[in-house]
Every structure is written in C-alpha cells, then in structure tokens.
Amino acid sequence: MTSPLEGVRVVEFGHYIAAPAATQILSDLGAAVVKVEPPAGDQARSIGSYGEGIVCAFNRGKRSIALDLKDPEHLAQALTLVEAADVVVQNLRAGVMERLGLGADVLTARNPRLVHVSVTGFPPGGPSASRAGLDIAAQAESGIMSITGERDREPQRVGFPVADVGASYAVVQAVLAALLRRERTGEGGRAEISLIDVAIHMQSAMWGEWHTSGQQPRRKGNGQATVAPAADLVGTADGLIVLSAYTAEHFARLCRFLEKEWLLDDPRFCDNPGRVAHRDLLLAEISEVLQHLGTQECVRLLSEQGLVAAAVREYADVATADDVAASGILTTGIDPAGERFTVPGLPFRLDHVPPVADQRVPAVGEDP
C-alpha cells in the first residue's frame, strides 16, 4: 500500500507545536521528515511534563539531527538537507532563519522546486512582525479570549493551544496545495502563516454574526447568545451534559420528552427570544427532570428524540469511549525512554493511508 506522500522529503526547523504538529501529519501521510534541532533540542524538551507531552505528540516517526546552525560546517549540512528536500517547514522566531543564512530567498534559490512554509506569531511585514508570538498572544489579540469565559468574569484562554494547532492544519493545507501546484507547473512555492491570522480565521462565524447583528460578540459562558436551549450545560444524576434543542420542532420534542408541553404555550418560552431572555428559568425546568437520570441515559434518550445531547467527558472517559475506539483516532507511540504512550493519530481516514502505531520519538540528534 502506497501512502499519499511516500517519497516526499520534509525538513523541519521547528519548536513546540505549530511546525512539529504539521510535519507530524505529513509524516503520518507517508512523508519522510527530518527534524533539525539545536544541540539542546526542541525547546519543548526542556519545559517539563507539558513539553514532554508536546514532543511525544508531534515528533513520532521522525529523524532528529542536532545542528548548531551558527557553526559553518553544521550550516552546510543543513543546506545539503534542504537541497534534497521537497518541503521545508519552520517556526523559529521571525528573522532568525534569515540571520542564520537559511531564509526563504536563500533556500528557494538553491532548490527552486522547494515548498517553503514559515510560521510566525504575527504577519510578516506588519508592525508586530518581530514580536514573540506564542499561542496565548494570538488568542488574546485575535479576539478569542474576549469571547471565552463567563459573562461577568475575566477573559479566558481556550483550554488547549488552539491557535498553534489551527496553524498546524493551515500549514498542511498550504503544503498539499503547493505540492499539487508543483506537480502541474514544476515550480515550488512559499507560504507564510501567522498564528493571529489563523486565530481570526477560526472565528469566521463570529465575524458573520457581528455583521448580521451589529452587536460586538461577548463572552457568555455556556449557551449561544441568540437561541436556547443551545450548547447549554445541564446537570444529570452523575455528571453533566450539553444540550441543544432550539428549533421549533426540536424544542417541541424536548418538551414532550420532559412531559412539560405547557412550555410551548408559555409566553416566556414559546419562541427563541423568550427562551433566551428566560434561559435560567428554562434550564431549571429541564434540570428538574434530567437531574434524576444518569448521564448516558440522558444522552441515549435525548438522542432517540433526534436532539443534540452529549456527555461532558474527561480524558480518561474519552480514551475508553466506544465511538473513539470505533474511529481509531487513538494510536500508540514510543517515547525516547522506550515507554509506550497513547496519542491521537490522523483526524481522518483516507484510502491508501495505512494505520501507524508504535512510532518512536527520537532523542535529540540520534540520527546521523
């Protein structure tokens, strides 16, 4: 079975998430990835358990070569790698690759068929181009934090590095598009991706809502601002579920299930504006019934009514869920110490992509 990217050679100059996560996907699709690390390694290797988790999640099956790029001999080795590569992905701080003599102009001049992708915190050429731009800066300045959290509490970051991960998907899209173009034209290409651009793009629906409503999006905790019940949190006998049933048909089904059909005629709840205005009262009526049912029972019974209901799970619950087992999303890797761990694999299934498991995470510079 031939993987889609078999024969594609990728060189990564990456730290932390955005570049390594992107090249992990390329690796899982069959590309051969060489990770060029400084002698001390990817910076994620030195920040404790969180960093170790990043390294394990996003560096499986790669080769690691340790190079001091300020050393002329090591720089020459890096250039040799690039000359034989199809793709270079880098997310070093803005300007670093240029100062080292590895800027996009230099690399594409030496290898005109090269697909070169740079990931930065802020757009190149903008006033913040030289600023350090980690995920949290993108969440803050893109508006994500302003809409995340409880209505009357301080802004919150999303509970995982959403801008970094989103950027990794954008990198993969750019690489695949550029490789397809190269197949047609023979020419390589460049892509520039910034975390803040990705973070803004992921909020496109909110920008559309801002346009149509004229109202600045605000954080509101659980629940959607203009419809109810929608993405609302409801307690059960042994946990929590989220519930959406805001169309007229679905709300009627919910009322029949709750045996509270009087809600359909109550002016507080008979239409969406009323339900939004009286959301707390509505959720109390729903909770009065659901609090006596188990979480899984609630999900099953509500789903049988064609309603959107889902259990709020912790990671241990996710790992043992039947749907997760059926999807095959979880795979195994082997960390530098030889220990096996569980980690998500590709988030899709594709013909001619064999499942991968037990890929090793290389120690710094373990490959010649």
Image (cartoon, rainbow, N blue to C red):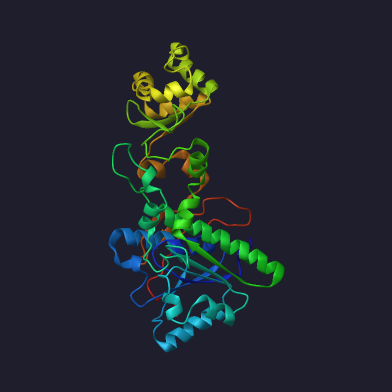
Question: Which residue does the image show at 40% across and 76% down from the upper left?
Answer: 365
Does 118 appear above or below 246? below
Q: How many marks?
A: 0
The percent position of residue 122, horizontal first and vertical second, equals 43, 62
Question: Which residue does the image show at 60% across and 64% down from the upper left?
Answer: 5
Does 151 appear above or below 135? above
Q: Which one is nearer the viewer's eye here, 157 or 88?
A: 157
Residue lying at the far bottom of the rendered structure: 73
Question: Which residue does the image show at 53% across and 81% down from the upper left?
Answer: 106
The percent position of residue 3, horizontal first and vertical second, equals 61, 62
Q: Which one is nearer the viewer's eye here, 264 or 31?
A: 264
Residue 359 visible in this rendered orientation of the protein: no
Residue lying at the far front of the rendered structure: 214
- Image quadrant where one finds the C terminus: bottom left
Residue 328 visible in this rendered orientation of the protein: yes
Tell me the quarter of the picture where residue 189 sits: bottom right
Does 207 appear above or below 261? below
Tell me the quarter of the picture where residue 2 sits: bottom right
Tell me the quarter of the picture where residue 41 sits: bottom left
The percent position of residue 257, horizontal first and vertical second, equals 46, 17
- Image quadrant where one finds the N terminus: bottom right
The percent position of residue 222, horizontal first and vertical second, equals 38, 35
